[in-house]
Image (cartoon, rainbow, N blue to C red):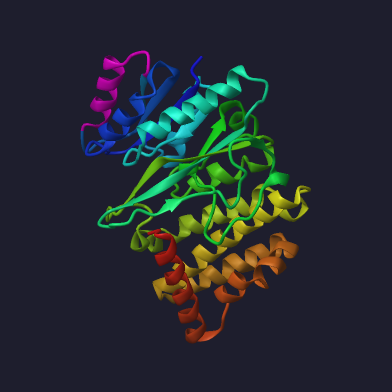
Amino acid sequence: MKLLSVAIPCYNSEAYMEHCIQTLLAGGEEVEIIIVDDGSTKDRTAEIADEYEQRYPTICRAVHQENGGHGQAVNTGLKHATGIFFKVVDSDDWVNEEAYRQVLDTLRRFVYGEDTLDMLVTNFVYEKEGAKRKKVMKYHTAFPKDRVFEWKDVKFFMTGQYILMHSVIYRTELLRQCGLELPQHTFYVDNIFVYQPLPHVKNIYYLDVNFYRYFIGRADQSVNETVMIGRLDQQIRVTKLMLGYYDVTKISCRKLRHYMIQYLEIMMTVSSVLAIKSGTEENLEKKKELWQYLKKTNLPLYLRLRTGFLGQGCNLPGKGGRELLILGYKITQKFYGFN
């Protein structure tokens, strides 16, 4: 059994996937690298995956599937994982090798020690193309450092500070037990990957190292704002799925309940901002329908989000109200370095 399984979803990734794989090979025999070729047809992605399996047969596995999208590639990686812990690294991203060794040292302690671990959180770096200063998402205000803790021990999440796929490593069996299965042919499912397992997580550890390097800047990237506006339906679909997993207003742990409500608030805000920035009446109607959907399915959550600062901003009347929301979004965008 491996210590860590890393799934790399690849779709026409020839130009950058080898850099990703090479950084992960530094983990040696304790790590299993599952290269999932998601029906690539335009380049050598499938051949590169096979080549790495042949060169490193005890570390790399090539898995080929019909195109099912990022979520299905993650599902496939999880299905094939034999490691105690599970991580997703996108094919255009990479990891810092020194931090990687510290991550493996930490995970090893929870295999051979007395404590169990459900979730390891590390920092990630926005490797934004053309940016001189690389922004780092840290969690030292939110989490105790260098010890196992529970949700009740969580401190303070700043605005825009969220646990993302880039920052999390889950215990593999926990993901299977919570029934995680991401939807096919849908973007932005990384939000589900992080969100759905949270109530099943008991023991957490925060390792304050800049492990994951998140590349951002390709024109065709799913987080490019123009691309996101074009995929508004998928953003809304993911948001509705997340709203339906739990009645978060009834989660018993106050800190976890607060965090999950915050997460849903940002999902509603992103969908609303994208609809407004598109400038079309059709998308403004979709925004209205999303808020009505929440009102119909969970009135207490609707009232909480609708009367909050972001909820009020999302629903300010008229053109002036919409412009004010977009200005606030741009300030947040600049401060945190996303998109």
Q: Is residue 55 magenta?
A: yes
Q: Quadrant of residue 57?
A: top left
Expressed as whole percent of the image width and height from the top left, the position of residue 300 reads 75, 64
Expressed as whole percent of the image width and height from the top left, the position of residue 301 reads 71, 62
Q: Which quarter of the image is occupied by the C terminus? A: bottom left
Q: How many numbered discs sit on the rendered protein?
A: 0
Report the magenta residues as a range: 44-59
Q: Is residue 296 left or right of residue 89?
A: right
Taking the image as drawn, is residue 76 in sight? no
Q: Is residue 256 magenta?
A: no
Helix, strand or loop: magenta stretch: helix
Q: Is residue 24 above or below residue 274?
A: above
- The residue lying at 37 percent from left, 13 percent from top is 58
Q: Is residue 235 above or below residue 19?
A: below
Taking the image as drawn, is residue 122 in sight? yes
Expressed as whole percent of the image width and height from the top left, the position of residue 187 reads 43, 49
- The residue lying at 70 percent from left, 60 percent from top is 297
Expressed as whole percent of the image width and height from the top left, the position of residue 172 reads 56, 27
Q: Is residue 84 above or below residue 147?
A: above
Q: Is residue 17 above or below residue 280?
A: above
Residue furthest front as drawn? 146
Between 193 and 217, which is closer to the camera in this rendering?
217
